[in-house]
Every structure is written in structure tokens, then in C-alpha cells.
Amino acid sequence: MNYSASPNEKAITAGELNRSHIGHTISFQSNDFTVVFGRIAGIARTDVQVYLSLDGVSGGTHLKDEYDLPVGQEVYLQLDPLSGAGKALSDAEKTIKEKLDDIVRNLRDREQKASSE
């Protein structure tokens, strides 16, 4: 199995995880047959390993809530919908401002043509 990110996930390496990621939803392939989805409860790190404690994973016969990952392993963080929405709104604001500036410019051009005739 080769798991890759869904459109609403961002790929980073396990070594990039830090305290700001606690509470985020994460997914990763823990072995050749298993993909893990959970919420980061804690992170510990050495030079070569990242140790994750997850909420919402344990309790099944094959599921555990702690994983040891190499620092270079790709993990996938769910994108923050609020920051995505903020960027979309900012982009929309910029587009609207550009359109309004074009309309104002066109109106001024028309007024100048009308007054010169």
C-alpha cells in the first residue's frame, strides 16, 4: 500500500513536527499494510526518531496509540480550514478591489471624454 495525501492534507516529514502540531489531525503509513489516522496528543523526538502519541486511535485489536517514525518519513497534516478560508477570502478581496479599481478608472475615463467633447 502506498498512501498519499488527500487534497485537504499537507505532506511534511515527521522531523518537522513540533509542539504547534499538537491537536492537529495526522495520517501516515505506519507499515506496508496500515495507514493511521489520529489526533496528535504528544510528540517526542531524537536525532533519528519521532515518537507520536495519538488520541482516537487505540482500542482495536491491531491499533495502538504510540508510533515511532523515522525523522524523514512523510506524514500528512489536515489543512486548517480557517486558514484556508482566510486565504480564499483574502484572494477574493484582492480580486474585488482590482475590479472596483477598473470600474472607477473606466468611469473617470468616460467623464473626461464627455467633458472634453
Image: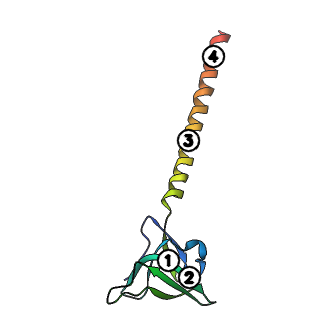
| Residue tagged 1 | 40
Residue furthest to the left in view is: 61
Answer with mark 1 or mark 4, whichever residue precedes in sequence: 1
- Rendering quarter of residue 94: top right
Going from N to C along the chain, the mark reached first, 4 or 2, is: 2
Q: Nearer the viewer, residue 95 or 24?
A: 24
Q: Mark 4 — residue?
A: 111
Mark-to-mark CA distance, 1 and 2: 7 Å
Write down the residue under mark 2: 43
Distance between the alpha carbons at the discs numbered 4 and 2: 64 Å
Q: Which residue position is annotated with label 3?
A: 95
Say which label, 3 or 1, has the lower sequence index: 1
Q: CA distance from mark 3 to mark 2?
A: 41 Å
Q: Nearer the viewer, mark 4 or mark 3?
A: 3
Which three-letter amino acid code belongs to the residue tagged 2?
Ile
Q: Quadrant of residue 112?
A: top right
